[in-house]
Image (cartoon, grey):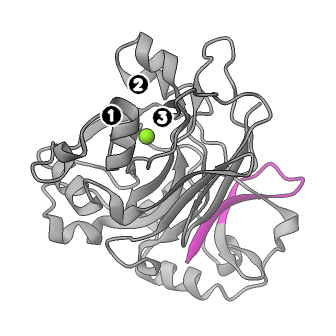
Amino acid sequence: MRLVTFKRCGEDREQVGVWTDGGVVPASALGLEFDSMNDLILRATPDDMAALRAAKAEPIPMDRVELQAPIPRPMQDVLCLGLNYTEHAEEAFGYSSQAFTSDKASPIFFSKRVNWCPGTGMPIPAHADLTQRLDFENELAVILSKDALNVKPDEAADYIFGYTIVNDVSARDLQTTHKQWYFGKSLDGFNPMGPCITTADAIAFPPCLDISTTLNGELRQNSNTRMLIHGIAEIIATLTRGMTLKAGTIIATGTPKGVLMGMENPVFLKKGDVVACRIEGIGELVNTVE
Ligand code: MG
């Protein structure tokens, strides 16, 4: 099932619903009232989820809704993996692939401040006064369904609500200047998310999904999430050793090779550039730099 946050065209109110072939079925049309996707993740019962899955109500056609990010306002900072695809680690820092195979290093964790996420079709602010090295990172993001502590790898799948696409937009010059990734990845609008959450039941675990990105129509990233150095079960098991992850936590699992900073003569994002992030089974997240 694909869950969305949306507004009816001409209305300001955000609603949650199910994205079906015919359009969006609002949860409210099924007799379910949720304030937001966060509220749905925290409160939906198995019966509610079954009703959403059945989606027995008239859908609103897609040309009459504006999709928002599925979780427009995350409850906490988004957790992120750094250098979690071998070829990206090589392009980013010249790390030898050997370091990630026979005796692989521990996962690199950091976080992003995200007050509000643009949805698909919404602009990425260029922040041209602050950065001249704006870059994209297409990533599979995992959303937790319940509080998680000391989770064993073979139990990790039970904690996943669903998956979405996150573009971990990054100001490379700020990352370098401040010696730490937090600020350079946390400017307003730097976490486009969408187009939907595909619930965990619809994707076999661990997810082996094609992931690709185009910049102005040119293919830049092309991989599969089975290439993650640290898989989702390991990520959840490692992060919950002594640290509780709350329901609704969003974990961006890292980006494959093909970001702009990996180019020999990088040309970074500029106003008007269109970044399209695709992941099999979830869809397409398209944003223009403005
Ligand atoms: Mg990233």
Amino acid tagged 2: Tyr
Residue 110, labelled with which disc?
1
How many residues crowd around disc 3 within 10 Å: few (fewer than 14), some, or many (20 or more)?
some
Residue 262, labelled with which disc?
3
Among the two numbered marks 2 and 3 on one chain, the one whose residue lies closer to the N terminus: 2
Name of the residue lying farthest toward the front: 264
Secondary element type, mark 3: helix
Marks 1 and 3: which is nearer the front? Answer: 3
Point 35% across, 20% down: residue:
180
Q: Quadrant of ligand 1?
A: top left
Marks 2 and 3: which is nearer the front? Answer: 3
Is mark 1 in CB contact (under 8 Å) with mark 3? Answer: no
Amino acid tagged 1: Phe
Asked whether 39 falls inside the magenta stretch, the response is no
Amino acid tagged 3: Gly
Residue picked out by circle 2: 182
Identify the magenta region: 1-16
Point 24% across, 45% down: residue:
97
Ligand 1 closer than 8 Å to label 2 CB: no
CA distance separating discs 2 and 3: 20 Å
Q: Nearer the viewer, residue 163 or 175?
A: 175
Residue 243 screen position, x and y as percent: 18, 43
Decide: is 122 above or below 205. above
Is mark 2 in CB contact (under 8 Å) with mark 1? Answer: yes
Quadrant showing the C terminus: top right
How many residues crowd around disc 1 within 10 Å: few (fewer than 14), some, or many (20 or more)?
some
Picture quadrant where residue 171 is located: top right
How many residues crowd around disc 2 within 10 Å: few (fewer than 14), some, or many (20 or more)?
some
Residue 268 screen position, x and y as percent: 63, 28
Point 40% across, 12% down: residue:
178
Is residue 120 visible in this depiction of the protein? yes
